[in-house]
Amino acid sequence: MTTAAPDRLDAAPLTLPERPLVSIVIPCLNEERYITALLDSLAAQDYGADGIEVLVADGGSTDRTRELVRGYPSPFARLELVDNPRRITVAGLNEGMKAARGDCWIIIGAHSKVRPDFVRCSVEALRRTGAACVGGPIATVGEGTVGKAIAAAMSSPFGVGNAKFRYAEDAGWVDTVPFGCYHRRVWEVVGEFDETVDGADEDSYNARLIEAGGRIWLDPSIRSTYYPRRTLGALARQYREYGAAKGTLFARGRPLRPRHFAPAAMVLGGPSLWLAGRVVKAARVLLWLLAALYLGLGMVMAARAAARQGANPLLTFAAMATMHVAYGAGFIEGWWRERGRAGATEPAV
C-alpha cells in the first residue's frame, strides 16, 4: 500500500538517494543551431552521463533538430525525443516531465549550454540546503554586433531589474532561478506547469512552489551559458510574451515583484503625462525630468554593461529600451485580455 505525497513541500525533509538519477527536460522548436552543443555539454558532465536522462520535448521542428537528437551518440542513461503537439514551452515541459523517471529534474533551454560540473553542483546544492529548487547565475553571451548588445542589456540591473540570477555572485534564497534543479517531490506536490500562460513558465511555477512551502536557493557554483536572440525584433517578441504572461497572472490575482510592474508603468505613464502636459505645465515638466533621468541613467548603465561584453553602448541602450517597452506593452495586453476573458465568463446577475 502506498501513501499519498504530502500536500506541502515543508511537510517533510526533502532527501535524495546517494546518487540520484537526474532528469533533464529541454523544450525546443527549430533549434538545430544549438541542440548538439547543448547535448555535448551534458554528455561531458563530471556527474557521469550514466546518471542523467535527457528528454527533448520538441514542438514539431521543421529544421534538422529532430534528426540531430535521434542521431546523437548517447552516453546517457536515456535520451528520448518527446513530442510536444501544442508547440508551446510550458506544454513541452509537461510532456517531458510525464516521461521523466529521475529523483530530481532540471529544466534547460535549448539556447544554452552548461559547465561540466553543472549537474553535480546542482545535486550537491539540493542535498546540502534542503531546498525544493536550486540554480545559479547564467552568463549571457551574444552572437554578432546586435546579439552582444542584447547580452549586455540582459546582464545589467537596469535592463532586467533585480533578477539576481542575471548578475549575482552571492549565494542566498531567491524567488526564482533559471535552469532550476528540482526535487522530484515538487512535481508531486505542485503539479504540472500552467499551459494557459506561456512565457512565465519557470517564474510562475516557482511562485507556486514557494506557496506550497518550498524554498529556492541561488548558488554561484552552478554555472550555465545562455545565447540570447540576435535581433531587436526577436528580442521584442520574446519580452512581449514574457510581459503578457505576467499581466495575465496579475489579472488572476497572483502577487508579483515590483520589477514586473515598472515597464508597464513606463509604457502607460509616458503617454499619460504627455497628454496631461498639453494642459498642465507640471505634467510636462515631470515628463521631461523622467525622460532625462531614464536616458541619462540608461546610457550610463548601458556603457558599463557594454564595456563588460565588448558591445556597442548605443545598441545596448536600444536593447534595454526594447525590453522595457515590449515587456510593458505585453503586460498591459495580457492583463487586459485576461480581464476581458474573466468578465465574459462571469454569470449575469
Image (spheres, rainbow, N blue to C red):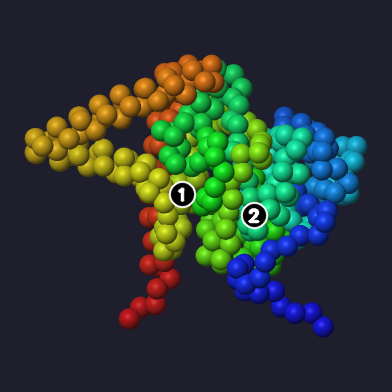
Identified by mark 1, the residue type is Ala
- Residue 1 lies, in percent from the top left, at 82, 83
Q: Is residue 48 above or below residue 139?
A: below
Q: How far separated are the C-alphas under marks 1 and 2?
A: 34 Å
Q: Residues within 10 Å of mark 2 (few under 14, many from 20)?
A: some
Q: Residues within 10 Å of mark 1 (few under 14, many from 20)?
A: many
Does the rendering let one see residue 341? Answer: no
Is 316 positioned to the left or the right of 34 in the image?
left
Residue 277, x across and y down, in percent:
14, 36
Quarter of the image for the C terminus: give it.
bottom left
> Which label number is shown at residue 244?
1
- Front-most of 76 and 272? 76
For label 2, the SS is helix
Mark closest to the chain's N terminus, 1 or 2: 2
Q: Is residue 135 left or right of residue 64?
A: left
Q: Nearer the viewer, mark 1 or mark 2?
A: 2
Q: Work out whether 238 lies above or below 57.
A: above
Residue 260 in the image, given as x and y percentages of width and height: 41, 47
Residue in the image at 40% along x and 45% along y: 259
Which residue carries the number 2 mark? 129
Q: Is residue 91 above or below residue 46?
A: below
Looking at the image, residue 36 sits to the left or right of residue 294; the answer is right
Q: Quadrant of residue 291?
A: top left
Considering depth in this image, is 309 or 54 the residue closer to the camera? 309
Q: Amino acid at mark 2?
A: Thr
